[in-house]
Image (cartoon, helix red, strand yellow):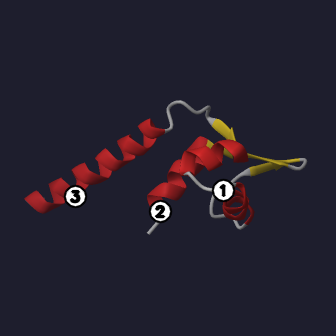
Amino acid sequence: MLNNNNCKRKDIVLSKNMEYKNIFSDYPDVVKVDDLTHMLGIGKNKAYELVNNGEIQSIKIGKKHIIPKFRVIEFLQNVK
């Protein structure tokens, strides 16, 4: 049986997921570290730290990291 509190919680979660999906709509589906700095408002060193330690999953091609946009959204959803 669902009570009113459970319904509200579910609405909040769905709402947050939709917000995260919409906030990066101007970015391509795969971004570079430079894009990540703008998306999160962080410096390049912090962006590389997040990527290199696996907090934001990326794909390394040669010396460059490419980051699926959904991984950035996933990271934001899991930040505590």
Q: Secondary structure at mark 2?
A: helix
Residue 46 lies, in percent from the top left, at 67, 62
| Mark 1 Cα-neighbour bin, 10 Å: few <14, some 14–19, many ≥20 | some
Q: Nearer the viewer, residue 55 or 10?
A: 55
The residue at which mark 3 appears reads as 9
Whether label 3 touches label 2, CB < 8 Å = no
Which residue carries the number 1 mark? Answer: 43
Say which label, 3 or 2, has the lower sequence index: 3
Give, as a three-letter code, the residue at label 3. Arg
Comparing labels 3 and 1, the label whose residue is closer to the camera: 1
Q: Say whether disc 3 or disc 1 marks the residue closer to the N-terminus.
A: 3
- Quarter-of-image position of residue 43: bottom right
Judge from the rendering whether residue 66 lies leftward or rightward of residue 63; answer left or right. Answer: left
Please name the residue shown 71% across and 64% down the image: 49
Amino acid type at circle 2 is: Asn
Quarter of the N terminus within the rendering: bottom left
